[in-house]
Image (cartoon, helix red, strand yellow):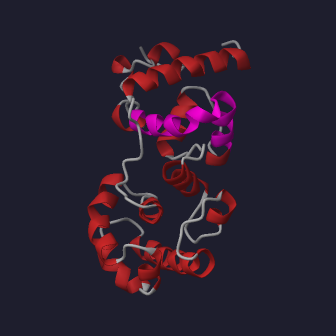
Amino acid sequence: MPRESVKAKKERAKLIWQELKLLYPDARTELNHETPFELLVSTILSAQATDKSVNAATPELFARYPDAPSMAQASPEELEPYIRTIGLYKNKAKNLVATARQLLKEHDGEVPNDFNTMLKLPGVGRKTANVVLSNAFGRPAIAVDTHVGRLAKRLRFSAHENPDKVEGDLEKLFPKNQWVFLHHALILHGRRVCFARKPNCVSCTLSPYCPSSRV
């Protein structure tokens, strides 16, 4: 199979983006939240967990600990009962309390609108920082989770397994003003059509532009 030129790949990316816009015009995060702090907490909890399980746990959690000052006063053990149904809940409880205390100490209890500063918070990696910055502050960012990584590989947009490198490859193909929508749309497509084990290529309207299509 001949190597695809950068120009051809960008043209194909444009067609895929247009199709995603038709499929998921209102694509956004499915984590329920009302404030940047709630989104940060939910995103930390969502690591290796489903959004559904996080959304089921957070109403009671946020009713008791609605902001960084209140959560900073808690111990990890006090948070655990609220998030026990979520994977790795003990470690996440420690990170949430430590993050809340750091926000209170260094940022007046507010979530910082800065990527490098976000990375210094316990339990926050590139994906979490990108999710929060893009959804809470409208900053251009591509959050690479398992769905985005899988689709990027199948669409031949990236050959990497490392999420940071996948992020960089996607940034080169799509304009900044498309980044936020792109990662939400790819996540939805990964959940609804392009499944990990048995992708539904027959029903996928991206098939004409997908080198991995089985149609």
Which span of residues is magenta-colored?
165-189
Magenta stretch, overall SS: helix
Give the residue displayed 33% in from the left and 19% down from the top.
203
Q: Position of residue 45 (x, y in %)?
A: 42, 64
Q: How far from the left and from the top, in percent, is residue 99?
A: 54, 74
- Vertical comparison of 129 with 148: above or below: below
Asked if residue 43 lies left or right of residue 160, the reply is: left
Residue 69: x percent and y percent? 46, 80
- Vertical comparison of 75 with 159: above or below: below
| Residue 175 drawn in magenta | yes
**Residue 41 in picture, x, y percent from top left:** 44, 66
Which residue is located at x 32 percent, y 65 percent?
58
Q: What is the quadrant of residue 38 in the picture?
A: bottom left
Q: Nearer the viewer, residue 20 or 165?
A: 20
- In the rendered structure, does residue 133 fall within the stretch colored magenta? no
Residue 3 appears in the picture as rendered:
no
Number of dots carrying numbers: 0
Give the position of the N terminus as an image quadrant. top right
Residue at the image position 47 percent from the left and 35 percent from the top: 186
Query: Is residue 98 rendered to the left or right of residue 204?
Result: right
Residue 155 occupies which quadrant of the picture? top right
For image coordinates 37% across by 53% down, the residue present is: 31
